[in-house]
Amino acid sequence: MKELTSRCLKALIATFCLATTLHSSAQTVKTLAVFDYANGAWPNAALVQATDGNLYGTTQINVFRMTPSGQITSLATFCSTPDCRILQTTMAPLVQGSDGNLYGSTDYGEGLKGGTLFKITPAGTYVLLNFPYGSTPNGLLQGVDGTLYGTTKYSSSLSGTVFKITLSGVLTTMYTFCTQTNCADGLLPIGGLVQASDGNFYGTTYEGGAFSEGTVFKITPTGTFTTLYTFCTQACLDGAHPMAGLVQGNDGDLYGTTSEGGTAGNGTIFKITLDGLLTTLYSFCVQTCSDGMHPTAALVQGSDGNFYGTTNGDAYCLGGSPNCGTLFQVTPSGAFTLLHTFCSVTLCADGRAPDAPLLQATNGTFYGSDQLGGSSAYSQCQIQSCGTMFGLSMGLRPFVEPTPAFGKPGTQIGILGTNLTGTTSVTFNGTPANFTVVSKKQIKAIVPSGATTGWVQVTTPAGTLSSNAIFTVNP
């Protein structure tokens, strides 16, 4: 860690807290399901809402489907024995492709080979590609061109890569990290990519850069690479060692977290412009760490415009158990609110150690997972328990979600929602669009000529639903 903590503690003496920590009691957190090894174990990746309205995710041993009410069905199992996690584990989120299939990755293949990319069809699991030994793919993203994009933590040179792969399985390595002197271009990307409204991809590396504490990078669809920012350029008050990917806010800026650095060395929340100007919004442990510490998951912007996230550790935990974790909300300007502390009931029945981003479903509820905790009678789950799924209600209304949230006039996009049957109109910032109701959960719409950047609105018999994010009309 290169004396990271000591440097940041020294900096703390000369700086004030960046934001005031508040505690909110208006929200409701509910445990929806408990993993018992039969339905999965140790979830640590974000959920995805598919076009059927259900939520899909992975644990370290399987892929599962969950209804919004919490009923879990295992779809594919990668492990048949408790100790096979070291052989093949799913630790990255799924993505639903334009063909309706779900795509994901595993850290390792059989016999400790490189990881695999797979798709889940109604008939089961199909492996797209086996990576070479040592390559560990992270989560996937489908670009607007229909191709899947992602990163690997490692590569043949143990430095990590950015890659793309077609739905038919043609793989192209777009960039290999640590090709510049002293790894100035970054090393070890752990988080996934985000495609911003300018069409380029953005991500983070855990190490590398001028101070070896991580970077933010940009790469174009054709593979042109740029290092946007190097962490610890501000005595590590700007953060260090980001473990998560980025999310683009409605203001066009990118938002993310670092697992270390900040005023107390326990992580930060930051925003960065597409040109590379970084602002630290919040430093964890400003109040004896009751606000949480070491965030390892990406943020999600809610339909209220605020960002929501998790930490997998905090200073106080029932019975002295480590890594209980917290839920928090932060505004785009950095005002922080603690929403929930896990392991707040006996034996951590409500879960602990959330290690994945939240998902806000179109019903307005946030969904997430705890890697550990929960009560289970299965022997494999007795030592640390197998984890839970939870829902976070902030009282937000249902909405519609354009996928993707940007496109050119004439482009067809999907719109997810609830109870869309009988829809009478779809507008892009007030401009009417041609559309087709595919199901009560999905609409297909054409970005209309003359549309401008703004909110998508869908009028149904029950009322008008607005999008959770601004739709960007590309030229």
Image (cartoon, grey):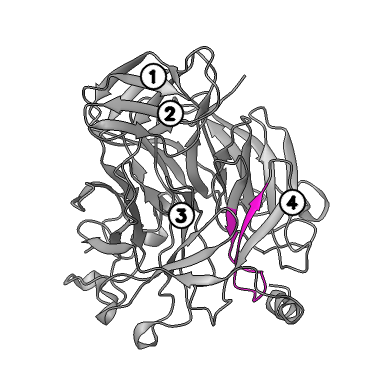
The percent position of residue 400, horizontal first and vertical second, equals 36, 34
Numbered badge on residue 456: 2
Disc 3 + disc 2, Cβ < 8 Å: no
Please tell me whether residue 193 is drawn above or below residue 186 in the rendered image: above
In front: mark 4 or mark 3? 4
Who comes first in sequence, dot 4 or dot 2?
4
Q: Would you say the residues marked 4 and 2 are in contact, meaning their CB atoms lie under 8 Å apart? A: no
Residue type for callout 3? Leu
Give the residue type at disc 1: Ala
Which mark is first along the chain, 4 or 1? 4
Going by the image, does 382 lie left or right of 370? left
Task: Name the mark nearer the viewer: 2 or 1.
Answer: 2
Q: Are marks 2 and 1 in contact (CB under 8 Å)?
A: yes
Residue located beneath label 4 in the image: 229
- Asked if the residues shown at circle 1 and circle 3 are in contact, with their CB atoms under 8 angstroms apart, the answer is no
List the residue tagged with mark 3.
112
The answer for how far apart the CA atoms under marks 1 and 4 are is 37 Å
Q: Quadrant of residue 20?
A: bottom right
The relative height of residue 381 versus residue 332 in the rendered view (above or below) is below
Disc on the earlier residue, 3 or 2: 3
Query: Callout 3: helix, strand or loop?
Result: helix
Q: Please state the extent of the stretch shown in magenta in the rendering.
A: 256-272
Q: Secondary structure at mark 1?
A: strand
